[in-house]
């Protein structure tokens, strides 16, 4: 029973409890009516949302092994399809490639009608928290809202056939956990956590009025959200890198050069001293994993390689000597089709648009040099702050088939990307091979209505062309049978 003071005694009418007074009763009736209306509306909205998501919202789990029969196989490696074999999935792994004439007892058989089965696609440069939300919203909205937007986009990512993403910047640890536990639907996530950046580096998203920093504890909104960690000096690098590893980073992302999406760091600048880079790579190596680095220029790439970075992100402005060195050192090159076309991240600032054009010209040159020197290359999108851009994920992969050929482009998004994911060693959150169809590999599979080795544009239209999407042995999309 609630007691009231003199200020509210007119509501009580001489008794100790106001709950049943006429005034409170009228308020309660209004609230109840309002809540009832809202509940009905929410129920309708929830039903419509569930209907719009269709079968993708729930994984179909079979208590029997699943045999994909009458199928042609792109195994993620070969430049031709494997004929005359089916793929047997048991639990969350591929058990065997079974000759077509061989019977498999006690298995659920899916007749694929001669379609092509391939590994689930891997985007090696994705930002799950930042892809589907405008920049100003991401940097100013309540952090839970950013997470909710990301969770919704994660399901769409999986429905595009991307069963794994290497997330290279953003607080995806909670989203990853929710997906892994079946609370949310989405791809496997290899998280980097906060982007490690110097003051005035590519991950310094502060506004001008926030400079100078007031004290060691005066963190910006993006730092508090876990999007970036601004550090200066090797000791601070060690601390922030170790924090991301503590939170569950499978690899670490550092910024070694300027970029287009940030306002205050020109693209030509080199970031982090050799000591700072070595602090990051040593801390990662001590945890059995590696560092990847955002950088475009030759000077920055060479500084990164000199100090232990194992994967270059972007690198479109590298000269021939630098690309040759990447090949000689076995450094991985994660590259994106930044072509300044209709699918590029929109920029309003004229300087940013000029930088985009410079990178677009460098992209074509980088594709050619990478092939010339046989650099180990993987593909990613780097869609950032662009809700519309997320829908082009498969289209971005299809583009690079123009330069690399369809088979190599697909390898870059399957088996090659799987090799990069494996660099995380002991920090790999998913034990098993990804990006390949072979016995023992994790059962992440896509059934395509057509042959992507002949027409890679098939991956650009997943709604039409992807008939089955399986992740971890569970079917998330099946329009072939249902």
Image (cartoon, rainbow, N blue to C red):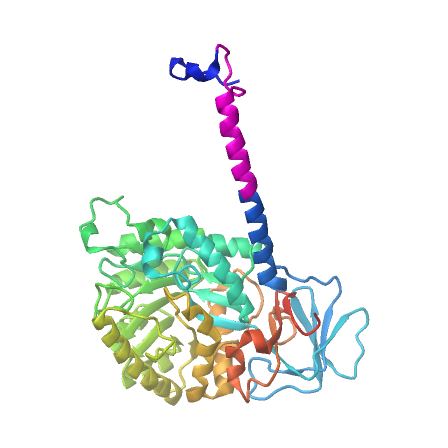
Position of 67 with respect to 410 (left or right) is right
Q: Which residues are magenta?
A: 14-37
Q: Out of 155 and 30, give the one closest to the viewer.
A: 30
Is residue 18 highlighted in magenta? yes
Number of numbered discs on residues: 0
Q: Out of 418 and 262, give the one closest to the viewer.
A: 262
Position of 376 with respect to 320 (left or right) is right
Can residue 264 be seen here? yes
Quarter in which the C terminus is drawn: bottom right
Can residue 267 be seen here? no
Q: Is residue 398 above or below residue 61?
A: below
Quarter-wise, where is residue 171 in the image? bottom left
Image coordinates of residue 173 in percent, x first then y, are: 46, 54
- Mainly helix, strand or loop, the magenta region? helix
Image coordinates of residue 132 in percent, x first then y, are: 42, 63
Q: Out of 233 and 338, give the one closest to the viewer.
A: 338
Q: Is residue 311 above or below residue 45?
A: below
Q: Residue furthest top?
A: 14
Q: Is residue 257 above or below residue 150?
A: below
Image coordinates of residue 94 in percent, x first then y, are: 66, 71
Image coordinates of residue 313 in percent, x first then y, are: 36, 72
Residue drawn 60% across the image and 54% down it: 47
Residue drawn 72% across the image and 82% down it: 70
Q: Is residue 412 above or below residue 238?
A: below
Is residue 225 highlighted in magenta? no
Residue drawn 74% across the image and 61% down it: 63
């Amino acid at each position: 029973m609630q007691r009231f003071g003199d200020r509210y005694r007119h509501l009580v009418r001489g008794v100790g409890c106001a709950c049943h007074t006429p005034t409170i009763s009228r308020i309660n009736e209004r609230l109840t009516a309002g809540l009832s209306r809202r509940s009905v509306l929410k129920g309708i909205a929830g039903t419509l949302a569930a209907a719009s998501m269709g079968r993708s919202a729930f994984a179909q789990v079979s208590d029997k092994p699943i045999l994909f029969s009458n199928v042609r196989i792109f195994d993620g490696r070969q430049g031709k399809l494997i004929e005359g074999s089916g793929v047997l999935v048991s639990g969350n792994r591929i058990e065997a490639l079974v000759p077509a004439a061989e019977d498999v007892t006690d298995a659920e058989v899916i007749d694929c009608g001669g379609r092509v089965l391939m590994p689930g696609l891997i985007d090696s440069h994705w930002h799950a928290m930042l892809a589907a939300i405008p920049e100003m919203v991401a940097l100013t909205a309540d952090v839970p809202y950013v997470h909710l937007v990301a969770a919704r986009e994660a399901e769409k990512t999986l429905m595009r056939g991307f069963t794994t993403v290497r997330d290279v910047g953003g607080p995806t640890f909670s989203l990853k956990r929710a997906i892994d536990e079946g609370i949310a639907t989405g791809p496997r996530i290899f998280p980097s956590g906060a982007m490690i950046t110097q003051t005035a580096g590519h991950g310094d998203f502060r506004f001008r009025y926030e400079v100078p920093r007031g004290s060691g504890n005066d963190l910006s909104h993006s730092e508090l959200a876990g999007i970036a960690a601004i550090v200066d000096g090797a000791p601070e690098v060690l601390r922030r890198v170790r924090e991301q590893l503590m939170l569950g980073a499978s690899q670490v992302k550092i910024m070694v050069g300027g970029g287009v999406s940030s306002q205050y760091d020109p693209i030509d600048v080199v970031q982090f001293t050799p000591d700072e880079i070595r602090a990051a790579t040593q801390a990662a190596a001590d945890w059995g994993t590696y560092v990847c680095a955002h950088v475009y220029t030759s000077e920055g790439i060479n500084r990164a390689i000199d100090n232990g970075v194992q994967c270059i992100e972007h690198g479109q402005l590298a000269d021939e000597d630098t690309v040759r060195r990447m090949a000689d050192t076995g450094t991985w090159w994660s590259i994106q089709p930044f072509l300044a076309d209709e699918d590029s991240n929109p920029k309003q600032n004229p300087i940013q648009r000029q930088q985009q054009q410079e990178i677009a010209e460098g992209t074509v040159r980088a594709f050619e040099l990478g092939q010339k020197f046989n650099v180990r290359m993987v593909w990613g999108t780097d869609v950032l702050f662009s809700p519309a851009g997320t829908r082009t994920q498969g289209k971005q992969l299809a583009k690079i088939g123009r330069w690399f050929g369809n088979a190599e482009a697909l390898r870059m998004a399957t088996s090659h990307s799987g090799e990069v994911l494996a660099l995380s060693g002991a920090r790999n959150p998913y034990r098993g091979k990804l990006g390949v169809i072979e016995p023992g590999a994790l059962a992440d599979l896509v059934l395509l209505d057509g042959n992507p080795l002949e027409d890679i544009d098939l991956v650009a239209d997943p709604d039409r062309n992807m008939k089955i999407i399986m992740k971890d042995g569970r079917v998330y999309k099946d329009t072939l049978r249902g």
